Amino acid sequence: MVRRPDRVRRAIGCVAQRSGVDLEATGHENLALQGRLYGIGGRALKSRVGGLLERFGLGEAADRITKTYSGGMRRKLDVALGLVHRPEVLFLDEPTTGLDPEARADMWNEITRLSSEEGITVLLTTHYLEEADRLARRLAIVDSGRVVAAGTPDELKAELRGDAIHVELGTPEPHALVRDALDRLQGVHEVVLEGRLVRARVDSGATAVPAVLGALESRGLAVAAVTIARPSLDDVYLRYAGRAFSQADVAHETGGPR
């Protein structure tokens, strides 16, 4: 009889933020040991280890000591370790942190494949909102330990009607002066200032830009650049957390609230 804790352990795989790879062992040895810990042996283990090494592009490096692997190769091995026992649910804690763009794209493709082709439920935490937008079927935004919004990426972005407008001022200006210029404009909402950057929600970007530029310039505020975009997950985070996601990262890294 299999006890419930054992059933749960076999049903889930976990890839922590910090690598769990044994740097003094080879890639093959890491995977073989993980398999034996889950009671896999013989031909089944040999086949599983070989298949994972090939799937993650580590076949040629299988017999190399893993301390010689690149960061991207170690991260791929971490994910392979979490998959040795064929879990139904895979937890990934910031799997692409520190990876170069090519390695990150490879990881995105593998996560997509695991979900779509193998039917594995993937629970992913990430600091990259573009990653969540691309990969998640459903997501939850957590701020200070509390879920402040949840839904599909499209559902959350659809809650923000209109456009997002970003204005870069020529020089840092007093926030009170900028707010005084913009608060009186119709169709301009949720103005947030971050140094020289002014973010706002507008009903219509095409009509709001001339009015915003005119209001700023009438106060003697020089504008270096202006962009209009459809709502993004960063705008969603700004709506629910009261600050941009980049600011949340800084607060988290310095020990402040997130």
Image (cartoon, rainbow, N blue to C red):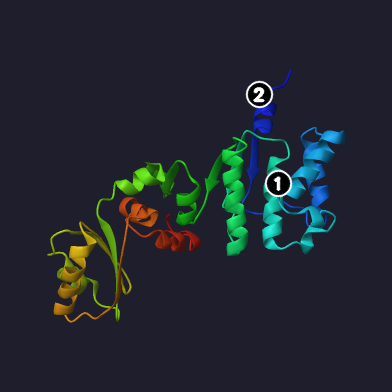
Q: Residue 103's spot in the image, x, y percent? A: 63, 60
Number of numbered tags placed on the structure image: 2
Q: Residue 172's spot in the image, x, y percent? A: 30, 78
Q: Is 191 on the left-hand or right-hand side of 116? A: left
Residue at numbered disc 2: 4
Mark 2 or 1, which is nearer the eye? 1
Q: Residue at x 27, y 58 (%)?
A: 163
Q: CA distance from mark 2 to mark 1?
A: 25 Å
| Mark 1: few/some/many CA within 10 Å (<14, 14-19, 20+) | many
Q: Is 71 on the left-hand or right-hand side of 189? A: right
Residue at numbered disc 1: 80
Q: As shown in the figure, which amino acid type bears the numbered disc 1? A: Ala
Q: Is 55 on the left-hand or right-hand side of 95? A: right
> Extreme right residue here?
42
What quarter of the picture does the C terminus occupy?
bottom left
Q: Is residue 160 visible?
A: yes
Nearest to the observer: residue 39 or residue 53: 53
Q: Residue 76's spot in the image, x, y percent? A: 68, 53
Q: Residue at x 85, y 55 (%)?
A: 63
Q: Is residue 118 above or below residue 111?
A: above
Q: As shown in the figure, which amino acid type bears the numbered disc 2? A: Arg
Q: Residue at x 21, y 79 (%)?
A: 221
Q: Residue 45's spot in the image, x, y percent? A: 82, 37
Secondary structure, mark 2, is helix
